Amino acid sequence: MLFDFGNVLVTWDPYAAYEGRMARADVEAFFEAVDFPTFNARQDAGRSWADARRELAEHHPGHVGTLDVYTENFAASLVGPVPGTEEVVRELRTLGVRLYGLTNWSAEMFHEAEPAAPAIGLMEDVLVSGRVGLVKPDPRIFEVAIERFALDPARTLFVDDSVANVTAAGTLGFRTLRFEHVEGLRARLRELGVQVAAA
Protein backbone atom coordinates (compact mmCIF):
# COMPACT_ATOMS: atom_id res chain seq x y z
CA MET A 1 0.00 0.00 0.00
CA LEU A 2 1.18 3.46 -0.88
CA PHE A 3 -0.85 6.16 0.84
CA ASP A 4 -1.28 9.83 0.21
CA PHE A 5 -1.91 11.57 3.55
CA GLY A 6 -3.81 14.84 3.12
CA ASN A 7 -7.56 14.15 3.06
CA VAL A 8 -6.87 10.42 2.98
CA LEU A 9 -5.43 9.80 6.45
CA VAL A 10 -5.56 13.33 7.86
CA THR A 11 -8.10 16.04 7.12
CA TRP A 12 -6.44 19.28 5.97
CA ASP A 13 -8.38 22.56 5.93
CA PRO A 14 -6.17 25.65 5.54
CA TYR A 15 -9.01 27.89 6.67
CA ALA A 16 -8.99 26.17 10.05
CA ALA A 17 -5.62 27.77 10.84
CA TYR A 18 -7.42 31.12 10.87
CA GLU A 19 -10.55 30.26 12.82
CA GLY A 20 -11.00 32.73 15.64
CA ARG A 21 -7.96 34.67 14.45
CA MET A 22 -8.97 36.40 11.21
CA ALA A 23 -12.13 37.12 9.26
CA ARG A 24 -12.76 34.58 6.52
CA ALA A 25 -13.09 37.36 3.92
CA ASP A 26 -9.53 38.50 4.71
CA VAL A 27 -8.25 34.95 4.42
CA GLU A 28 -10.02 34.49 1.10
CA ALA A 29 -8.46 37.71 -0.17
CA PHE A 30 -5.01 36.38 0.75
CA PHE A 31 -5.64 33.00 -0.85
CA GLU A 32 -6.83 34.67 -4.05
CA ALA A 33 -3.99 37.19 -4.17
CA VAL A 34 -1.26 34.54 -3.93
CA ASP A 35 -3.14 31.76 -5.80
CA PHE A 36 -2.92 29.61 -2.69
CA PRO A 37 -2.93 26.17 -4.40
CA THR A 38 0.09 27.21 -6.47
CA PHE A 39 1.71 28.94 -3.50
CA ASN A 40 1.27 25.85 -1.35
CA ALA A 41 2.55 23.55 -4.10
CA ARG A 42 5.83 25.47 -4.04
CA GLN A 43 6.10 24.76 -0.32
CA ASP A 44 5.43 21.09 -1.00
CA ALA A 45 8.20 21.21 -3.62
CA GLY A 46 10.74 22.34 -1.07
CA ARG A 47 10.61 26.14 -0.89
CA SER A 48 11.31 27.24 2.67
CA TRP A 49 8.73 29.26 4.55
CA ALA A 50 11.36 31.94 5.12
CA ASP A 51 11.81 32.26 1.34
CA ALA A 52 8.05 32.28 0.85
CA ARG A 53 7.74 35.09 3.35
CA ARG A 54 10.49 37.12 1.64
CA GLU A 55 8.82 36.71 -1.74
CA LEU A 56 5.46 37.67 -0.29
CA ALA A 57 6.96 40.78 1.32
CA GLU A 58 8.23 41.79 -2.11
CA HIS A 59 5.07 41.16 -4.11
CA HIS A 60 2.19 41.29 -1.61
CA PRO A 61 3.50 43.08 1.50
CA GLY A 62 0.01 43.57 2.90
CA HIS A 63 -0.44 39.82 3.27
CA VAL A 64 2.74 38.96 5.18
CA GLY A 65 0.91 38.98 8.50
CA THR A 66 -1.74 36.66 7.08
CA LEU A 67 0.93 34.18 6.07
CA ASP A 68 2.45 34.40 9.54
CA VAL A 69 -0.88 33.46 11.10
CA TYR A 70 -0.99 30.39 8.86
CA THR A 71 2.54 29.18 9.59
CA GLU A 72 2.20 29.84 13.33
CA ASN A 73 -1.07 27.89 13.47
CA PHE A 74 -0.47 25.25 10.82
CA ALA A 75 -1.22 22.45 13.27
CA ALA A 76 -4.78 23.76 13.53
CA SER A 77 -5.26 23.18 9.79
CA LEU A 78 -4.88 19.44 10.45
CA VAL A 79 -8.32 18.92 11.89
CA GLY A 80 -7.99 15.24 12.69
CA PRO A 81 -7.96 11.77 11.16
CA VAL A 82 -10.14 11.07 8.14
CA PRO A 83 -12.94 8.94 9.62
CA GLY A 84 -12.32 5.22 9.40
CA THR A 85 -8.97 5.19 7.65
CA GLU A 86 -6.86 4.52 10.74
CA GLU A 87 -8.84 1.35 11.35
CA VAL A 88 -8.11 0.20 7.79
CA VAL A 89 -4.40 0.90 8.22
CA ARG A 90 -4.33 -1.10 11.44
CA GLU A 91 -6.13 -4.01 9.75
CA LEU A 92 -3.65 -3.95 6.89
CA ARG A 93 -0.74 -3.93 9.31
CA THR A 94 -2.20 -6.96 11.12
CA LEU A 95 -2.53 -8.72 7.76
CA GLY A 96 1.15 -8.13 7.04
CA VAL A 97 0.62 -5.67 4.19
CA ARG A 98 3.59 -3.35 3.65
CA LEU A 99 2.56 0.25 4.30
CA TYR A 100 4.25 3.33 2.86
CA GLY A 101 3.45 7.01 2.46
CA LEU A 102 3.93 9.35 -0.50
CA THR A 103 2.82 12.83 0.42
CA ASN A 104 2.98 16.34 -0.99
CA TRP A 105 3.93 18.20 2.18
CA SER A 106 6.27 20.95 3.30
CA ALA A 107 9.40 19.43 4.82
CA GLU A 108 9.30 22.02 7.60
CA MET A 109 5.71 21.21 8.56
CA PHE A 110 5.69 17.43 8.25
CA HIS A 111 6.38 16.92 11.95
CA GLU A 112 2.79 18.03 12.59
CA ALA A 113 1.31 15.15 10.57
CA GLU A 114 1.51 12.17 12.91
CA PRO A 115 0.17 13.96 16.01
CA ALA A 116 -2.93 14.86 13.98
CA ALA A 117 -3.39 11.38 12.51
CA PRO A 118 -1.59 8.54 14.34
CA ALA A 119 -2.06 6.18 11.36
CA ILE A 120 0.75 8.08 9.65
CA GLY A 121 3.11 6.71 12.29
CA LEU A 122 2.20 3.16 11.24
CA MET A 123 3.89 3.53 7.86
CA GLU A 124 7.15 1.63 7.36
CA ASP A 125 8.59 4.68 5.61
CA VAL A 126 7.38 7.95 4.10
CA LEU A 127 8.54 9.94 1.09
CA VAL A 128 7.85 13.65 1.68
CA SER A 129 7.83 15.83 -1.43
CA GLY A 130 9.41 18.80 0.29
CA ARG A 131 12.43 16.71 1.25
CA VAL A 132 13.14 15.51 -2.30
CA GLY A 133 12.10 18.59 -4.27
CA LEU A 134 9.52 16.74 -6.34
CA VAL A 135 5.74 16.80 -6.11
CA LYS A 136 2.96 14.56 -7.32
CA PRO A 137 1.84 14.15 -10.07
CA ASP A 138 5.41 14.37 -11.41
CA PRO A 139 6.24 10.77 -12.43
CA ARG A 140 9.72 11.20 -11.02
CA ILE A 141 8.50 11.21 -7.43
CA PHE A 142 6.73 7.91 -8.04
CA GLU A 143 9.95 6.51 -9.51
CA VAL A 144 11.82 7.61 -6.39
CA ALA A 145 9.19 5.85 -4.25
CA ILE A 146 9.45 2.65 -6.33
CA GLU A 147 13.21 2.54 -5.84
CA ARG A 148 13.28 3.64 -2.21
CA PHE A 149 10.56 1.26 -1.03
CA ALA A 150 11.41 -1.58 -3.46
CA LEU A 151 7.87 -1.56 -4.83
CA ASP A 152 6.38 -3.61 -7.61
CA PRO A 153 3.73 -1.18 -8.94
CA ALA A 154 1.59 -4.03 -10.27
CA ARG A 155 1.32 -5.38 -6.72
CA THR A 156 0.93 -1.99 -5.01
CA LEU A 157 -2.28 -0.06 -4.43
CA PHE A 158 -1.78 3.71 -4.51
CA VAL A 159 -4.49 5.72 -2.74
CA ASP A 160 -4.86 9.47 -3.23
CA ASP A 161 -7.72 11.98 -3.29
CA SER A 162 -6.32 13.73 -6.40
CA VAL A 163 -7.40 12.56 -9.84
CA ALA A 164 -4.15 13.87 -11.36
CA ASN A 165 -2.02 11.94 -8.87
CA VAL A 166 -3.98 8.73 -9.33
CA THR A 167 -3.74 9.06 -13.10
CA ALA A 168 0.02 9.57 -12.94
CA ALA A 169 0.44 6.51 -10.74
CA GLY A 170 -1.67 4.45 -13.11
CA THR A 171 0.57 5.29 -16.05
CA LEU A 172 3.47 3.78 -14.10
CA GLY A 173 1.59 0.53 -13.53
CA PHE A 174 0.24 1.03 -10.01
CA ARG A 175 -3.13 -0.29 -8.94
CA THR A 176 -4.98 2.86 -7.93
CA LEU A 177 -7.90 4.27 -5.99
CA ARG A 178 -9.12 7.84 -6.05
CA PHE A 179 -10.07 8.17 -2.37
CA GLU A 180 -13.49 9.58 -1.59
CA HIS A 181 -14.51 7.69 1.57
CA VAL A 182 -13.39 4.76 3.66
CA GLU A 183 -16.14 2.51 2.30
CA GLY A 184 -14.66 2.83 -1.17
CA LEU A 185 -11.22 2.00 0.17
CA ARG A 186 -12.48 -1.14 1.87
CA ALA A 187 -14.33 -2.19 -1.27
CA ARG A 188 -11.26 -1.70 -3.48
CA LEU A 189 -9.06 -3.69 -1.10
CA ARG A 190 -11.53 -6.56 -1.00
CA GLU A 191 -11.76 -6.44 -4.80
CA LEU A 192 -8.00 -6.98 -4.87
CA GLY A 193 -8.27 -9.93 -2.51
CA VAL A 194 -7.14 -8.20 0.69
CA GLN A 195 -9.24 -9.56 3.55
CA VAL A 196 -10.15 -6.39 5.37
CA ALA A 197 -13.59 -6.22 6.93
CA ALA A 198 -16.43 -5.15 4.66
CA ALA A 199 -17.71 -1.60 5.06
Image (spheres, grey):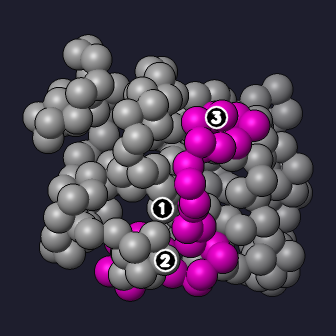
> Which residue type carries mark 2?
Arg
> Which residue type carries mark 3?
Ala
Residue 45's quadrant in the figure? bottom right
Left or right: 138, with 117 as reference point: left
Q: Which residue is mark 1?
A: 102
Which residue sits at x=50%, y=56%? 101
Q: Which quarter of the image is occupied by the C terminus?
A: top left
Precedes in sequence: disc 3 or disc 1? 1
Q: Position of residue 35 (x, y in %)?
A: 54, 65
User: Looking at this view, is 84 or 67 the one in front?
Assistant: 84
User: Looking at this view, is 9 or 47 the one in front?
Assistant: 9
Placement of 79 over or under 132, stated as above or below: above
Q: From the image, state whether disc 2 or disc 3 is nearer to you.
A: 2
- In space, the residues marked 2 and 1 are separated at their CA atoms by 11 Å
- In space, the residues marked 3 and 1 are separated at their CA atoms by 15 Å
Q: From the image, state whether disc 2 or disc 1 is nearer to you.
A: 2
Which residue sits at x=55%, y=67%? 127
Left or right: 106, with 32 as reference point: right
Within-10-Å neighbours for mark 3: few <14, some 14–19, many 20+:
many
User: Looking at this view, is 130 or 194 the one in front?
Assistant: 194
> Which residue type carries mark 1?
Leu
Pointers 3 and 1 in contact (CB under 8 A)? Answer: no
Q: Which residue is mark 2?
A: 148
179 within the magenta span:
no
- Give the farthest residue toward the left: 191
Which residue sits at x=42%, y=81%? 147
